[in-house]
Image (cartoon, rainbow, N blue to C red):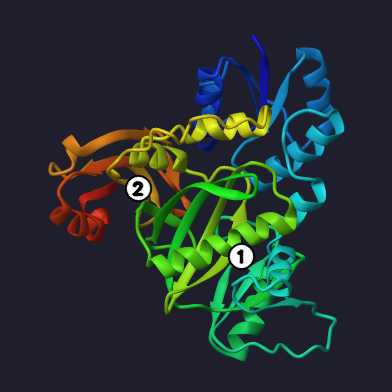
Amino acid sequence: MKKIVILGGSHRDIPLIKASQELGYYVITLGDRDYYLGHNYSNKACKINFNDLDKVKELIKEEEVDYIIPGSGEESYLNTVLLAHELHIGNFDTLETAQLVHNKWKFKKFCLENGISTPKGFFYNENSNDKINLEFPIVVKPTNLSGGRGVEVVYNENQLHKALQHTSDISNEIFLEEFIDGKLIAYSIFLKEQKIVYGFLGDDATYLNPYLITSAYPTTIEKETLTKLQNDIEKLAQLLKLVDGMFHLQVLIKNNIPYIIDVTRRIPGDLYPYLIEYSDGVEYSKAVVKAYTTGQIDDEFKYKNEKQNFIIRHCVMPTQNGIYESIKIDSSLEEKILLNFSLIEPEYHITNYLNTQLAIIFIKLDKSDEIENIIKNINKLIQVTLKK
């Protein structure tokens, strides 16, 4: 049995762990966090920090590992690319390309220089006298953090000054971009010979934290908008010489113009691959594993559902701090639940409710007239109770 090491072991990596096993691999997960739930699903869990590359290389040699793949994280992906090229295994972009794609400012700069639709931006240097030639509102972003950490939208000079001070405390690289007040979507695609062979469009919704996605579900956009977006992506793929495999993008749409705001070549988190698989019936996770390893994508997207299922992936979050007791689900949803994956056990003391996820629930809806109502009221239909 061939062995595969995943540089990760959290719940976000479970789709890749299971897919790798279904493809016949013996799976070893890495990660030194006690709360990593993915370790419970692998064949062997090694609680070592996957940023310690010397230890990772030792493990790869001792276990006679055949392939390494990244989990759902930026550092994991970049470490995997570095090691894969050093050890001459797997199918990945060049390290230079990977570092460009996963640095928010470098990627934005590349897009602006090559006519790819993205919001106008500016790299911030506190020692520079360069004028910030952007129109308010402005988004302040760290280049090297994900999940909305350090992101703020500001509407005047005073707010901008405070936001820059705050973001500087958590990141030494910051850029600014003009705020686009549009529809936020995710576009998960697969590339083959730098052409899109599969794509999934998802609506991204937030709850109390405007920078943390909670609910996601299939969506559609205007044909002309999709064509423009696809043309930009394939242009990017050709310019960067992207290898075959997945590419996940966040896009804002305003006046039918798509603006690419973030991209990654590692799987989206919080079990998002299952949203794609439940909705379209494709073997997305297996395709990801095969692309990273042999580079050979076969018929994983051939048997796509004729009619897309409407699935909601909902991350359950509390509305305040306290002692977690339970999650109450409205009776109207009980028979529609495909998966209810618990992330945290009752009695957990919630101290940061704006960034705490308690469970991930997948809901299948069959009647079109109930979809809008359930989406609108999802946080009332699924509620967190705390001990009084």
**Residue 297 position in % (x across, y down):** 58, 32
Q: From where the camera sits, is residue 139 visible?
A: yes
Tell me the tag on residue 73: none
Q: Is residue 159 positioned above or below 169 on the image?
A: below
**Residue 331 position in % (x across, y down):** 13, 41
Q: Is residue 122 positioned above or below 7 on the image?
A: below
Q: Determine the secondary structure under disc 1.
A: loop
Q: How many marks?
A: 2
Q: Determine the secondary structure under disc 2.
A: strand
Query: Of circles 2 and 1, which is in front?
Result: 2
Task: Identify the residue shown where x is 59% and y is 64%.
Answer: 232
Crowding at dot 2, Cα within 10 Å, few <14 / some 14-19 / many 20+, comes out as many
Work out whether mark 2 precedes mark 1 in sequence or the reverse, and give the earlier one: 1
Identify the residue under disc 2.
314
Q: Is residue 188 positioned above or below 136 on the image?
A: above
**Residue 128 position in % (x across, y down):** 84, 83
Compute the Cα span from label 2 to label 1: 23 Å
Q: In the shown orientation, is residue 243 left or right of residue 272?
A: right
Crowding at dot 1, Cα within 10 Å, few <14 / some 14-19 / many 20+, comes out as many
Q: In the shown orientation, is residue 241 left or right of residue 265?
A: right
Amino acid type indicated by mark 2: His
Task: Identify the residue shown where x is 66% and y is 60%.
Answer: 236
Res 24 → quadrant: top right
**Residue 271 position in % (x across, y down):** 45, 39
Identify the residue under disc 1.
150
